[in-house]
Image: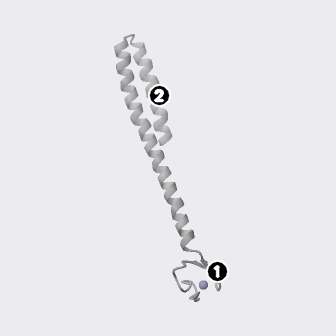
Amino acid sequence: MGKIAFYVGIIVVTVSLIVGFSTGSFLKFIGIGTFGGSIALILFLLNLLLHNQKMILAKLNEHEEMVKKLRNNIDCPNCHYKFNEMLTSCPHCGYRAK
Ligand SMILES: [Zn+2]
């Protein structure tokens, strides 16, 4: 989705420049070029936004994994079930760690 918006933006700029140039009028060239450029800018921003969103989601997942690792850091000596160090006994087999 993000890549499509990026390529469409490039195509829009190219087409608007060609169309503007083919009119032979400098003012029309500027006008159409600006119009195409604005549309492309919106598409580029959309692409950037989607990219950022993916990055944020990836970071969140990374964070969640880290938190999970930090929380489940006790290996039950009885059944080897990993559990939170805040717990005093294994939630899997009931073995008392302390
Ligand atoms: Zn256990």
Is ligand 1 within 8 Å of the beta carbon of the residue shown at mark 1? yes
Residue drawn at the location 64% of the way across and 86% of the way down: 78
Please, which colouring scheme is shown? one colour
Q: Amino acid at mark 2?
A: Ile
Is ligand 1 within 8 Å of the beta carbon of the residue shown at mark 2? no
Q: What x and y, as percent, mark residue 8?
A: 46, 33
Q: Label 2: which residue?
A: 11
Q: Residues within 10 Å of mark 1 (few under 14, many from 20)?
A: few
Q: What x and y, as percent, mark residue 96?
A: 57, 89
Establish if 56 lies above or below 81: above
Q: Amino acid at mark 1?
A: His
For the C terminus, the image quarter is: bottom right
Q: Are marks 1 and 2 in contact (CB under 8 Å)?
A: no
Give the alpha-carbon distance from disc 1 to disc 2, as whole Å: 58 Å
Residue drawn at the location 55% of the way across and 65% of the way down: 66
Residue drawn at the location 51% of the way across and 80% of the way down: 86
Q: What x and y, as percent, mark residue 37?
A: 40, 27
Q: Label 1: which residue?
A: 80
Q: In terms of secondary structure, where does tag 1 sit? A: loop
Res 75 → quadrant: bottom right
Res 13 → quadrant: top left
